[in-house]
């Protein structure tokens, strides 16, 4: 029997890439590949790239420089290392990668991962393989969309893709070009995936998509189902105690989704709802198709349905034409909403997007200053949010042993990591934890079961998790 070949995947970018990396591992397992955390002893290295900002894209070429040295070194000892570039940079600039980086053996875009074994075989025969037949028509539709394969269970929490691609065409964004048009998976397939994952120990499902609440997959009744209806259905699956979804667009928040937050205890009260800017002028130039007030009203609808709901967001500072006044509107919106956390980025012009042709670039120094001010405000909101947890008893889904011996780590409803001293038997369970302190972003506490007040016991037993026991 031949020794297993070692595979190392380095992923950049969004959760879709994390999911895709798992899919690639599963696709290559029958070919005799096992995953390794160490790039240096891998027989196959896959860079799973992101094209969203210039910095992310450039990482590919600097990483390829390092890999060339590793490949040469391995060759000296008679070992062949295969290098593949996957992800959104592969999709956007496959030809250029082949031209610029002779070290690369295979280039494969996100729609072609199921062809990886054939592409590797082709590269072995011919030296290199570029998946040039990215089957896009002139509207960026995939001519033959593949069926995204389900991934196997890896621990307590799992992603499940429900839709891919985006039709929104925000003027700054490459995603509609790299991931193609918006496609939803049929409900029955998603339900099968979730059941199988639940049978294999998964307790928490995060439904993912570039635009997850644009979901409109065919239901068993032959009609398209909105995300809220799908969530209601998934909440019934035995073993599933927590549901999440990401990333949402403000334009696609339907009543069924709001209702799901009111009706489903399993649906976590934490929503990532990117707004990008607080200025209507900039939002229009971004083609976001909503105003700052639309966004405020959407937040109000969520809050009316679920009082302990919290939000995170994405922001871009320095979009072309952004004035001091526009930026002040962003700060005002953040101050008014109050986030549990948020990501903020300096605008990065992306080739081929409409905003890249806009003239009024904001000076780098101004962008830097705005980013620092915005991040300071967001950080203060995040730390206030985390500090407010101290002294409270909160539900934690335990995931794995922590780095400190004897500790188990899990996550609260708001994805805050929480550590307790306990045995590994609590992994897979949701248990109330009395939070004592906060260390950077991690909460430390103790299981509250023994000393729980009657109210806590009531709320704990009301949670379906308590009956599950992994
Ligand atoms: N689908 C999601 C997010 C996609 S990309 C949504 O619609 O919100 C993740 C984040 O990267 C975006 O929310 C945006 O804040 C940021 N981003 C995208 N393109 C960018 C660019 N050209 N420059 C800077 N940030 C960008
Ligand atoms: Fe990009 Fe806009 Fe689509 Fe989000 S909604 S992926 S920001 S085009
Ligand atoms: Fe990046 Fe592609 Fe995701 S560009 S953010 S990896 S969809």
Image: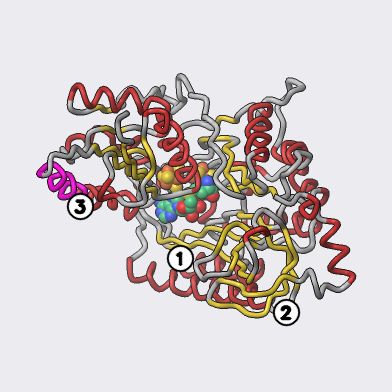
Q: With respect to residue 10, does 382 lie above or below?
A: below
SS for callout 2: loop
Q: Residue at x 60, y 29 (%)?
A: 185
User: Of marks 2 and 3, which one's residue comes earlier in the chain?
Assistant: 3
Tell me the CA gap for discs 3 and 1.
41 Å
Q: Which residue is mark 3?
A: 66
Q: Residue furthest front?
A: 1
Q: With respect to residue 345, does 37 lie above or below?
A: above
SS for callout 3: helix
Tell me the number on the disc at residue 266: none
Q: Based on the displayed image, in which of its 4 quarters is residue 232 positioned? A: top right
Q: With respect to residue 81, does 111 lie above or below?
A: above
Tell me the number on the disc at residue 391: 2
Q: Are marks 3 and 1 in contact (CB under 8 Å)?
A: no
In this figure, what is the number of numbered marks?
Answer: 3
Question: Is-magenta flag for residue 130?
Answer: no
Tell me the number on the disc at residue 323: 1
Q: Are marks 2 and 3 in contact (CB under 8 Å)?
A: no
Left or right, 436 with respect to 371, comes to right
Q: Residue at x 76, y 63 (%)?
A: 308
Q: Residue furthest left?
A: 76
User: Of marks 1 and 2, which one's residue comes earlier in the chain?
Assistant: 1
For the residues carrying marks 3 and 1, which lies nearer the camera in this image? 3
Task: Please tell me which residue lies in front, 293 or 19.
Answer: 19
At which x and y percent is residue 437? 63, 80
């Amino acid at each position: 029997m031949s020794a297993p070949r070692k595979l190392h995947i380095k992923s950049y970018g969004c959760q879709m890439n994390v999911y895709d990396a798992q899919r690639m591992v599963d696709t290559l397992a029958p070919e005799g590949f096992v995953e390794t955390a160490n790039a240096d002893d891998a027989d196959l290295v896959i860079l799973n790239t992101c094209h969203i900002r210039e910095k992310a894209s450039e990482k590919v070429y600097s990483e390829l420089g390092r890999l060339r040295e590793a490949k040469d070194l391995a060759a000296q000892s008679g070992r062949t290392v295969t290098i593949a570039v996957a992800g959104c940079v592969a999709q956007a600039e496959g030809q250029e990668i082949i031209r610029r980086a002779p070290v690369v053996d295979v280039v494969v875009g996100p729609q072609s991962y199921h062809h990886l074994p054939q592409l590797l075989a082709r590269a072995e025969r011919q030296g290199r393989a570029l998946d040039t037949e990215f089957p896009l028509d002139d509207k960026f539709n995939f001519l033959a969309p593949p069926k995204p394969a389900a991934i196997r269970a890896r621990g307590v929490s799992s992603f499940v893709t429900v839709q891919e691609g985006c039709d929104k065409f925000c003027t700054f964004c490459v995603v509609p070009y790299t991931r193609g048009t918006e496609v939803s998976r049929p409900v029955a397939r998603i339900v099968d995936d979730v059941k199988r994952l639940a049978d294999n120990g998964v307790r928490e499902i995060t439904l993912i998509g570039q635009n997850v609440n644009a979901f409109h997959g065919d239901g068993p009744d032959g009609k398209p189902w909105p995300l809220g209806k799908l969530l209601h259905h998934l909440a019934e699956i035995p073993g599933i105690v927590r549901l999440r979804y990401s990333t949402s667009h403000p334009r696609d928040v339907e009543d069924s989704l709001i209702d799901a937050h009111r009706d489903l205890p399993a649906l976590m009260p934490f929503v990532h709802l990117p707004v990008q800017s607080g200025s209507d002028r900039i939002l229009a130039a971004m083609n976001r198709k909503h105003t700052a007030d639309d966004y405020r009203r959407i937040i109000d609808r969520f809050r009316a349905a679920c009082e302990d709901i919290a939000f995170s967001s994405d922001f871009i500072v320095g979009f072309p034409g952004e004035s001091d006044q526009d930026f002040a509107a962003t700060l005002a919106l953040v101050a008014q909403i109050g986030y549990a956390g948020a990501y903020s980025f300096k605008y990065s012009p992306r080739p081929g997007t409409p905003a890249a042709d806009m003239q009024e670039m904001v000076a780098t120094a101004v962008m830097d200053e705005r980013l620092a001010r915005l991040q300071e405000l967001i950080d203060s909101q995040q730390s206030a949010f985390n500090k407010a947890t101290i002294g409270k008893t909160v539900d934690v889904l335990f995931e794995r042993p922590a780095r400190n011996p004897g500790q188990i780590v899990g996550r609260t409803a708001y994805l805050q990591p929480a550590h307790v001293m306990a045995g590994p038997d609590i992994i897979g369970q949701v248990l109330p934890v009395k939070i004592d302190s906060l260390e950077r972003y991690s909460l430390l506490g103790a299981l509250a079961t023994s000393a729980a007040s009657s109210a806590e016991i009531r709320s704990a037993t009301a949670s379906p998790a308590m009956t599950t026991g992994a």
